[in-house]
Image: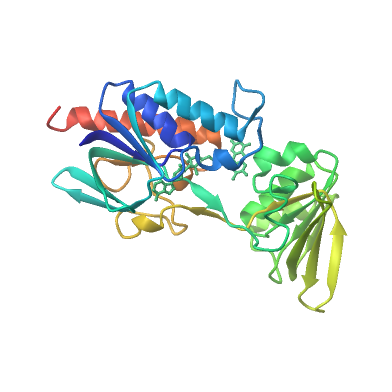
């Protein structure tokens, strides 16, 4: 059995693996897709000490760093079930194999909910963005839209209004759902327009990048097209935790509930990164949390029986 089995190979899982292996304990990483969301990212400019890199390059660097340590990497492996039995944890994989470990770190990340309209996939990273902290500065002085009037959409619109030329906030419902204080702040900004009862129908582009967005006015049924260069989709971040429902405590949003040490509601099971309740889903935060969960797992192991 492993001393530490890490499920998920994004920045959180990679950091956890390096920290665990450096303690000289048996460490394994099982990941559906080593690299995680980083593989889907173009420019990354907020990983401190690395002013600019690209997703695939950083993913490769994560893997190289993990491979320099004694870690068993099991790529293309999806975990489907976790069980606790007499202090030993077992994780059943989609292929049928079961892995055993004295402690587990869950770092299965999350995925952005997409609009599912024509053009969205084609122009991902070419004007269609999901993270204002990451991509906001790329749209300096340009016209953008934010899709979604919940807290994350309104926060994104307020944030972007300070960087871009104009923000159009588009909400499907008849009103915004964000906290009143955020809505008040949003309405006070001169370069923001709010559109409610609007259903986005298409992302328009010139083959290279986004040039506009079409929507249907749900009151009149009329169709309109706006010219803009960026679209920030803020309709939800879904944690990859469906397989853990009923096994350990999840928040109403499906995030694994962790304490300041990365401890979950199950003894010996820790979690880190975008799949947890830790706020702000970012590479540097996921990596830091992965390191922390790993140190917590080590602390747990030295306090439990059998070296
Ligand atoms: P992830 O990166 O999501 O990795 C999860 C891992 O778990 C993957 O290996 C996945 O295959 C695996 N997995 C999932 N389910 C299972 C399962 N059941 N069994 C086994 N393995 C499983 N952040 C920044 O800081 N800067 C940026 O510029 C930036 N740009 C971004 C651009 C895009 C397009 C996207 C999508 C995200 C961006 N982010 C950025 C966010 C950043 O990528 C995430 O915060 C970070 O990758 C989270 O790391 P993680 O390790 O928690 O999860």
Residue at image location 43% in from the left, 29% down from the top: 15
Quadrant location of residue 43? Answer: top right
Looking at the image, the residue that sits furthest to the bottom is 220
Residue drawn at (41%, 53%), measured in percent from left and top?
241
**Residue shown at the point (59%, 28%) measured from the top left:** 47
Foreground residue, 69 or 293?
Answer: 69
In the rendering, at what x and y percent does residue 243 appear?
Answer: 36, 57
Residue 108 image position (x, y, % from top left): 43, 45
Q: For residue 244, which quarter of the picture?
A: bottom left
Question: For this view, does 258 lie left or right of residue 224?
Answer: left
Would residue 36 be seen by someone viewing this image from the given angle? Answer: yes
Residue 79 position in % (x across, y down): 35, 50
Horizontal side of residue 34 vs 143, given as left or right = left
88 relative to 121, above or below: above
Image coordinates for residue 273, horizontal then vertical, percent: 46, 40
Query: In this rendering, is residue 221 above or below 297?
Result: below
* Quadrant position of residue 139: top right
Q: Is residue 281 visible?
A: no
Q: Could you tell me which quadrant the N terminus lies in?
A: top left
Quadrant where the C terminus lies? top left
Quick check: 180 left or right of 303?
right
* 190 is higher (above) or lower (below) than 57: below
The residue nearer to you, when weighing 79 against 170, is 79
Q: Which residue is rendered at x = 49% and y = 29% of the image?
A: 62
């Amino acid at each position: 059995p492993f001393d530490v089995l890490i499920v998920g190979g994004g920045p959180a899982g990679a950091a956890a693996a390096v920290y665990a292996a450096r303690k000289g304990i048996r460490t394994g990483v099982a990941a559906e897709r080593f690299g995680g969301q980083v593989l889907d990212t173009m420019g990354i400019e907020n990983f401190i000490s690395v002013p600019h890199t690209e997703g695939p390059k950083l993913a490769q660097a994560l893997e190289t760093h993990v491979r320099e340590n004694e870690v068993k990497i099991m790529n293309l492996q999806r975990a489907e079930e976790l069980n606790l039995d007499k202090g030993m944890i077992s994780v059943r994989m989609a292929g049928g194999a079961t892995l055993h470990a004295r402690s587990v770190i869950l770092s299965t990340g999350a995925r952005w909910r997409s609009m599912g309209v024509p053009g969205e996939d084609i122009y991902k990273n070419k004007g269609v963005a999901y993270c204002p902290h990451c991509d906001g500065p790329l749209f300096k002085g340009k016209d953008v839209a934010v899709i979604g009037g919940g807290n994350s959409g309104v926060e994104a619109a307020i944030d972007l209004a300070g960087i871009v030329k104009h923000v159009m906030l588009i909400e499907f419902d008849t009103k915004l759902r964000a906290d009143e204080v955020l809505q008040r702040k949003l309405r006070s900004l001169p370069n923001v327009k709010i559109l409610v009862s609007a259903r986005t129908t298409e992302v328009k582009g010139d083959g290279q990048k986004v040039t506009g967005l079409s929507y249907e006015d749900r009151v009149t049924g009329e169709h309109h097209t706006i010219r803009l260069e960026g679209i920030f989709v803020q309709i939800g971040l879904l944690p990859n935790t469906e397989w853990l429902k009923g096994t350990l405590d999840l928040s109403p949003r499906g995030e694994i509930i962790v304490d300041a040490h990365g401890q979950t509601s199950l003894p010996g099971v820790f979690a880190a990164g975008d799949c947890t309740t830790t706020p702000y889903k970012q590479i540097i935060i996921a990596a830091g949390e992965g390191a922390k969960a790993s140190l917590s797992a080590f602390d747990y192991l030295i306090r439990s029986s059998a070296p």
